[in-house]
Structures are given as C-alpha cells and as structure tokens.
Image: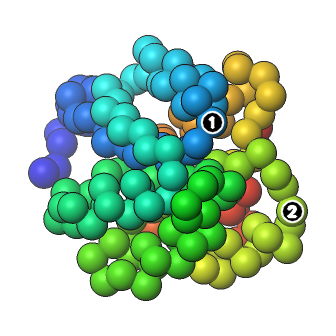
Amino acid sequence: MIYQNEAYQNEAIKEMTCHLILADDDADDCLFFEEALEDFAVPVSLKTVNDGEALMRLLLTDPEDLPDALFLDLNMPRKNGFDCLSEIKANDQLKQLPVIIFSTSMDLKVADMLYLNGAHYYIRKPSEFPKLKQVVREAIAIILKNPARPAREEFILQS
C-alpha cells in the first residue's frame, strides 16, 4: 500500500503489532526485556522460551507464522544459541527470520562467526536499564524498517 503522506504512514505503523520471541534462560533478563518494551511506539507481542529446544519446537510448530524478529541468548540449556542459529539458518522455512543475538558476552571472533552464520544483529546485554531499553527499541525499529541483514560494520548494536 502506498501512503499519501507521512501522517498516514505514521498512523499505519502505530496500528501494526510487532511479534517477537525472546529465547533466554535468565528470568530477570526476560523481565527486564519485557519492561523495556513498555510504552514502545508500536504494540509488541512477546513470547519467551527458556531453552533452545523449546525455541525450535515453537518455531517449527507453525513456520508460516514467524515473528518479526527473534532475540536469541547464546548460553541456554538443552540447546545453546549457536546451535539454534545454525538450525534456523539451515531450514528453508525459517532462514529468513531476523535473528538478533542478545548475550552478556562480547567476543569479536564469536561475533564474526555469528554474522557469517546468518545472525542479523548482535547486542551485548547492557547492565543499565535505560541503555537496555534504548538498544532493544533501536533493534526493533531497524528490523521493522528493513528486515534484511546489514553489512558487517553495522552488525553490533552498541548499548
């Protein structure tokens, strides 16, 4: 649909709902993430899973109804984020899903590997809530505007 002016476009964005999945085994991190989405310009629907096996079951249950983005922790029980990313990007029905790595660690060699394996963005979990709120919202806004993978130089979102 082509909008006649920016006001119509802004109204259309406000009416859409952003569907997200957060895969993270830390209950506090899940709570902070959910709180960071409050009062966001776009309504957000958030599903959380606490391990990689639950994530893959959720994604494979209905691969025709994927979320707008997946925020993926690397260190989870049963199946870690590295394995989940590999499975997602190897699956023809899932590989277009934007995956945002959401981890406490920051190792540039690991980040390079994750980018090569198909992740869209990498966020190091900030320790301060305002920074968390800012970087999560920035990632969502970027994905909603353009779900394509960025150049490597834009892969790491700073908090």
Query: Residue at horizontal 39%, vertical 76%?
Result: 95
Is there CB contact under 8 Å for labels 1 and 2?
A: no
Residue corresponding to mark 1: 26
Q: Quadrant of the C terminus?
A: top right
Q: Nearer the viewer, mark 1 or mark 2?
A: 1
Q: Which mark is residue 112?
A: none
Could you tell me the amino acid type at mark 1? Asp
| Residue on which the image places disc 2 | 107
Is any atom of residue 6 visible in this view?
no
Question: What color scheme is it?
Answer: rainbow
What residue is rendered at 62% in x and 70% in y? 82
Label 1 sits on a secondary structure element that is loop
Question: Taking 60 as reference, is 34 left or right?
Answer: right
Image x and y of residue 43, in percent? 31, 26
- Taking depth in this image into account, of 120 and 41 the one nearest to the observer is 120
Q: Position of residue 9 (x, y in %)?
A: 26, 36
Judged left or right of residue 154, residue 35 is left
Kindly indicate the quadrant of the structure image that contains residue 101: bottom right
From the viewer's perspective, is residue 42 above or below residue 111?
A: above
Q: Amino acid at mark 2?
A: Asp
Please tell me how crowded label 2 is: few (under 14), some (14-19), or many (20+) other residues with Cα within 10 Å: few
Q: CA–CA distance between discs 1 and 2? A: 20 Å
Q: Position of residue 87 (x, y in %)?
A: 46, 77
Furthest toward the front, the residue is 78
98 or 11: nearer the viewer:
98
Compared with residue 46, is residue 53 higher up or lower down, i.e. above or below? below
Q: Residue at x 37, y 35 (%)?
A: 46
- Tell which residue pokes out farthest to the left in this image: 1
Q: Secondary structure at mark 2?
A: loop
